[in-house]
Image (cartoon, coloured by chain):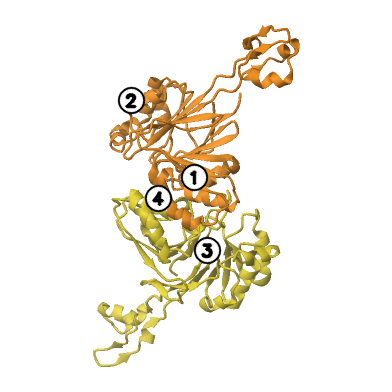
Chain colours: A yellow, B orange
């Protein structure tokens, strides 16, 4: 199975601590890297994770709170110092470009590559990015300011060729590409060999949904139905449910309910409030509702 | 002796590594904190150093390269989240406020305290800040863009009262303040007791000079004469002297020569290039010229 890994670079919330970094994740899908959010210190966490800067071409920013985007300018500058040439694409609300452009003009003048912003509107539910490996759909979360979740859906790979059938029917190599993509094979004598005899179906595709920051909103399950892994913020424990509602954040219990109600296979919780020195409290509360829950942690990699 | 400590929060250069943070230092002078430079990740290093955020009221920024100022916005935001009320004063070139103001307006709206910029011009050689404990003088360094060094000069404390003389002459407590500040005492019978018999002089004042980033420029010794501790950047080893000159940085050897020629008592080197995995090479090269040299390192505290 091809790689679909989630690297946790930071899973703290707004107040930084010595234990947690501000929010950032990197998805490694078939050796291409996609970043979600970029809090202060992300570039250092990226190095620590021994990821390859040159494989990162797309960054998705969920919302314009500092703990989700203050690391961008440093990351962009460092890419310039490293002589990057490939365009870096940033997918975000329109306000981010306005805010960053003066800084980019001043600090990154004469850089060897360009930064291209791909704005999407508040409340967007479209597929905002698409390549051969993945599609990324935005959907609105319920936070104090406009905030977007993202679903990464793997694209199907081509079907697998049955080698022994290729040999049996003496099929020329030139036909392999067509057959992988679904074509039947017509023998010189006119006999049609259906594609299903020549191939086994591609591996099932996988999906990852990212929900941070948001208060509990059951309507949002429509966007994240049946994902293989759901990341959901769990800033607070149940005892702080009132504070969670007030600050538009979720409790671990609520994150688990979202996982259960949306049909997720696994749940990953993060965006922990600085008040917790041991997040197992949050883990236990989530597992009471949804046993297949894990805790995010800097440096950890979750494989799909 | 009252406290005059230099905390190293970051001593790397422009390219961040997992070993070094971007530049920042905090001076603790008589329990008041003064920050010099604020690269990305400074707020986290500040916490690690277990310094008290509420004692920091003044930040001095040497120049507008990202590795010296990208941590400001995160630090300022965090102070807001923590409910700070005291004004935070930032001393810097005028361009910094222009660059930061849109970000502050957007990310820090409604914050419980204000940020006040105190611009000083390129090439400034004035005392740019002054309080009961310290004066801070700016002076120009020789970098690719305008860049300022800073000399922190401790103010003299009041003289120490000789308790036994106070008792001997039966001097009332109300006179202590005046005598500490240099007054003689006139006895009821008109006899004048000179101040020198009643006090011992204040401890000698100490001074700290900060030079980063700069290429070797012997003219700059005029601003940093006879300091107790000189911090001087030493980005490169001697073998990279050409690259140092080209990028307007210094070698360890040159830093040591600056210490020697300016009459510094001790030298601290930092701003190490990412190419060095062991800075003892730089230390050894500096010590050949100036034996009282030490290496900066994150988390270390240098006492004056």
**Is label 3 in contact with label 4 (beta carbons under 8 Å)?**
no
SS at mark 1? strand
Task: Please give the label number shown on residue A302.
Answer: 3
Q: Earlier in the sequence, mark 4 or mark 2?
A: 4
Label 2 to label 1, Cα distance in Å?
32 Å
Nearest to viewer (mark 4 / mark 2):
4
**Is label 3 in contact with label 1 (beta carbons under 8 Å)?**
no
Q: Quadrant of the N terminus of chain A?
A: bottom left
SS at mark 3? strand
Chain at tag 4: B
On the same chain, marks 4 and 1? The answer is yes
Instruction: Provide the residue designation for mark 1.
Output: B116
Task: In the rendered view, tell whether residue A66 sits above or below residue B89.
Answer: below
Task: Please give the label number shown on residue B99.
Answer: 4
Task: Give the residue at x 38% y 40%.
Answer: B275
Label 3 to label 2, Cα distance in Å?
56 Å
Task: In the rendered view, tell whether residue B210 sits above or below residue A180.
Answer: above
The furthest residue to the bottom? A190
SS at mark 2? helix
- Left or right: B28 in relation to A133: right
Label 4 to label 2, Cα distance in Å?
31 Å
């Amino acid at each position: 199975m091809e790689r679909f890994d989630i690297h946790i670079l930071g899973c703290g919330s707004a107040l930084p601590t010595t234990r947690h970094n501000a929010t950032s994740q990197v998805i490694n899908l078939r050796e291409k890297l996609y970043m979600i959010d970029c809090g202060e210190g992300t570039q250092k966490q990226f190095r620590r994770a021994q990821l390859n800067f040159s494989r990162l071409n797309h960054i998705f920013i969920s919302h314009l709170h500092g703990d989700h985007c203050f690391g961008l300018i440093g990351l962009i500058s460092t890419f310039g110092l490293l002589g990057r040439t490939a365009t870096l694409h940033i997918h975000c609300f329109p306000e981010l470009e306005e805010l960053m452009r003066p800084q980019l003009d001043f600090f990154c003048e004469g850089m060897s590559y360009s930064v291209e912003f791909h704005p999407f509107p508040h409340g967007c539910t479209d597929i905002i990015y698409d390549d051969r490996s993945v599609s990324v759909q935005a959907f609105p979360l319920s936070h104090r300011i406009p905030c977007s979740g993202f679903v990464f859906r793997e694209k199907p790979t081509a079907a697998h060729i049955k080698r022994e059938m290729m040999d049996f029917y003496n099929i020329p190599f030139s036909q392999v590409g067509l057959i992988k993509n679904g074509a039947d094979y017509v023998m010189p004598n006119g006999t049609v060999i259906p594609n299903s005899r020549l191939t086994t179906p591609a591996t099932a595709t996988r999906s990852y949904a990212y929900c941070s920051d948001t208060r509990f909103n059951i309507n949002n399950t429509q966007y994240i139905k049946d994902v293989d892994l759901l990341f959901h913020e769990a800033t607070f424990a149940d005892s702080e449910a009132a504070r969670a509602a007030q600050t538009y954040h979720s409790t671990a219990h609520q994150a688990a309910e979202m996982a259960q109600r949306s049909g997720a296979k696994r749940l990953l919780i993060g965006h922990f409030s600085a008040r917790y020195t041991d997040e197992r409290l949050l883990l236990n509360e989530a597992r009471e509702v949804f046993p297949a829950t894990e805790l995010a942690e800097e440096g950890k990699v979750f494989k799909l």
